[in-house]
Image: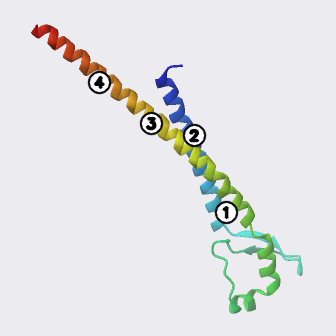
Amino acid sequence: MNDQARNWRLFGLGIGLLSAALILWVWSAVLLVKPYRVEVPSSGDTKTCEAPLFAGHDEVEVWKKGTALIEACEEARRWPRIVVIVGASVPVSVIGAILFTAGGLGLRLRGLTDDVRELETEARRRRRAAA
């Protein structure tokens, strides 16, 4: 396989991996800001909990909602899933950035060498024509 095809392949793989990392980041952001439902053990009702990013508990909130709902929300909170998703996106992002950079740099260098060869060929023609 020639260098240009290999560089295009690396460049495309880099874009693909960076796109996958973007999807993972968006998924984790949605999980952070989206409220979720949980069943309260004391009453058996299904209630909506605040999004993990906005969950905060003060005395007034505990008094209004009751401790059973707050405890059920804290137990069902999706922090482990969010951390795993973000953790999985890091190596995908790094490898994608490396491949994207290597492929793009290879393509630019190939273009530069082609330009230099063209200039050298033109200089040879001019020398021959002048002689």
3D distance between C-alphas at marks 4 and 2: 32 Å
Instruction: Tell me the quarter of the image containing the C terminus.
Output: top left
3D distance between C-alphas at marks 3 and 1: 34 Å
The residue type indicated by label 3 comes to Gly
3D distance between C-alphas at marks 3 and 2: 14 Å
- Horizontal and vertical percent position of residue 37: 76, 69
Question: Is residue 19 visible from the viewing direction of this image?
Answer: no
- What residue is at 58 percent from the left and 44 percent from the top? 95
- Horizontal and vertical percent position of residue 65: 75, 86
Q: Using the image, determine if residue 41 lies above or below residue 61.
A: above
The residue type indicated by label 2 comes to Gly
Q: Of discs 3 and 1, which sits in the foreground?
A: 3
Residue linked to disc 1: 31
Between 34 and 58, the one nearer to me in the picture: 58
The residue type indicated by label 1 comes to Leu
Q: Using the image, determine if residue 107 lies above or below residue 90.
A: above
The crowding category of the residue bearing disc 2, from other C-alpha atoms within 10 Å (few below 14, some 14 to 19, many at least 20), is some
Helix, strand or loop under label 3: helix
Q: Earlier in the sequence, mark 1 or mark 2?
A: 2
3D distance between C-alphas at marks 1 and 2: 23 Å
Residue 9 marker:
none
Q: Of discs 3 and 2, which sits in the foreground?
A: 3
3D distance between C-alphas at marks 4 and 3: 18 Å
Q: Earlier in the sequence, mark 4 or mark 2?
A: 2
The crowding category of the residue bearing disc 4, from other C-alpha atoms within 10 Å (few below 14, some 14 to 19, many at least 20), is few
- Horizontal and vertical percent position of residue 3: 48, 24
Q: Say left or right for 8 vs 71.
A: left
Q: Residue furthest left?
A: 130
- Horizontal and vertical percent position of residue 78: 74, 66
Between 79 and 65, the one nearer to me in the picture: 79
Residue 104 marker:
3
Question: What is the image's colouring?
Answer: rainbow
